[in-house]
Image (cartoon, coloured by chain):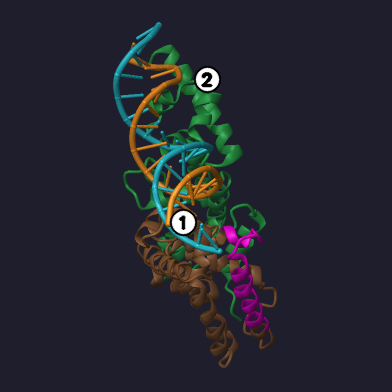
Chain colours: A brown, B green, C cyan, D orange
DNA sequence: ACCTGAACACCGTTCAAGT
DNA sequence: ACCTGAACACCGTTCAAGT
């Protein structure tokens, strides 16, 4: 890549991170280009879709999730599964709008974010299998169940981490007596 | 209201119901006006905001929820609460986009839909209180917990009623062994 | 090879003119 | 009193022209 192209790329990443942090993933792309001192066309050249830009900004954080999962597998499988679901909640809700963005990406294999969804799913499946082996959770529990509850809680409690944790625990422990 | 105004009002309602049914609550307002054989301005005159139009279209269904709740109170309080949560899920997800619309309305007292949210909440609170009296549910369970789980499940399983019911039951029964 | 930004497209909303 | 629809606003996206 040409030197000026690379510099523009970096600037766009920096400004996109700032904009997503301040206004969520729906931040104006035109504003991001302007903040980076670049024409809109340049933004589109480097990041053909909004999802490409989101992926580039959040890639590190997505990849850190794998490490988080590795750390968790050391402990008790039931606790590990809870820790993993909570880690996903924190990750997804750390950037406003990401929950809605992922809801689209999950069902669209063409989306640049689709692969990240699948990575998280496969980690969930692994931790779920372990938890089942030790009898920590109901044997009929499935990975799609976990994905749905995590996305649902993320959506309805996007800006309230304490409530996310509470709802997760209600889900795990049950509500009926 | 003048006769032609009333006729336009009715036509707009009919076409809006059709459009929301086909395309969800994000349906184009311009298309609705066109389908009703009316200028966009007329639509805005009768329904200043999209939420006003949604409310007018769904008012009957919202009001039917109160009757549903009355029927449920006859039976076992635990079953009644489950039935009520399920009824809310069906109602909310029957119109695509309504979950997202309500998520905004809940936090905005100015929204025409805000009152409907509060009505549902107060019914929830009543059924929850009854269920607690008979020891059917955890005593620390709150109405906001119920609202959050219903909206979360509605969002993540909007087009899959069977999964809605499954997740609700997982929530009620618990997942850990 | 890459960048720029005007031009286009799309849709929601308003308001001057008409009946 | 109510209706119409052109005009305006806003934002995302493309592409001809420039370096």
Q: Position of residue A41 (x, y in %)?
A: 48, 54
In this view of the protein, which residue sits in the foreground, C15 or B120?
Answer: C15
Residue A108 part of the magenta segment = yes
Q: Position of residue D2 (x, y in %)?
A: 38, 17
Give the magenta range. A104-129
Secondary structure under the numbered disc 1 in the rendered image = helix
Among the two numbered marks 2 and 1 on one chain, the one whose residue lies closer to the N terminus: 2
Q: Chain of mark 1?
A: B
Image point (53%, 30%), residue name: B31
Secondary structure under the numbered disc 2 in the rendered image = loop
Specify whether disc 2 shares its chain with disc 1.
yes
Determine whether B52 is above or below A116 in the image: above
Magenta segment main secondary structure = helix
Residue bearing mark 1: B127
Side of B121 relative to A78 (left or right): left
Residue bearing mark 2: B37
Side of A27 relative to A71 (left or right): left
Nearer the observer, disc 2 or disc 1?
A: 2
Determine whether B142 is above or below C4 in the image: below
Q: Position of residue A94 (x, y in %)?
A: 42, 70
Q: Position of residue A127 (x, y in %)?
A: 63, 82
């Amino acid at each position: 890549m040409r030197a000026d192209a690379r510099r523009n790329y970096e600037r766009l990443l920096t400004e996109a991170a700032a904009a997503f942090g301040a206004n969520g993933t729906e931040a104006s792309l035109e504003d991001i280009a302007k903040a980076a001192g670049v024409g809109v066309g340049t933004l589109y050249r480097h990041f053909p879709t909004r999802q490409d830009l989101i992926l580039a900004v959040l890639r590190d954080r997505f990849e850190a999730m794998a490490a988080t999962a590795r750390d968790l597998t050391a402990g008790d499988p039931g606790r590990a599964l809870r820790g993993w679901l909570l880690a996903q909640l924190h990750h997804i809700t750390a950037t406003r709008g990401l929950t809605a963005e992922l809801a689209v990406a999950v069902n669209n294999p063409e989306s640049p974010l689709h692969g990240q969804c699948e990575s998280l799913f496969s980690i969930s499946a692994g931790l779920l299998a372990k938890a089942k082996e030790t009898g920590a959770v109901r044997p009929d529990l499935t990975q799609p169940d976990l994905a749905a509850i995590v996305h649902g809680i993320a959506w309805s409690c996007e800006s309230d981490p304490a409530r996310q944790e509470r709802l997760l625990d209600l889900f795990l422990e049950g509500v009926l007596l």
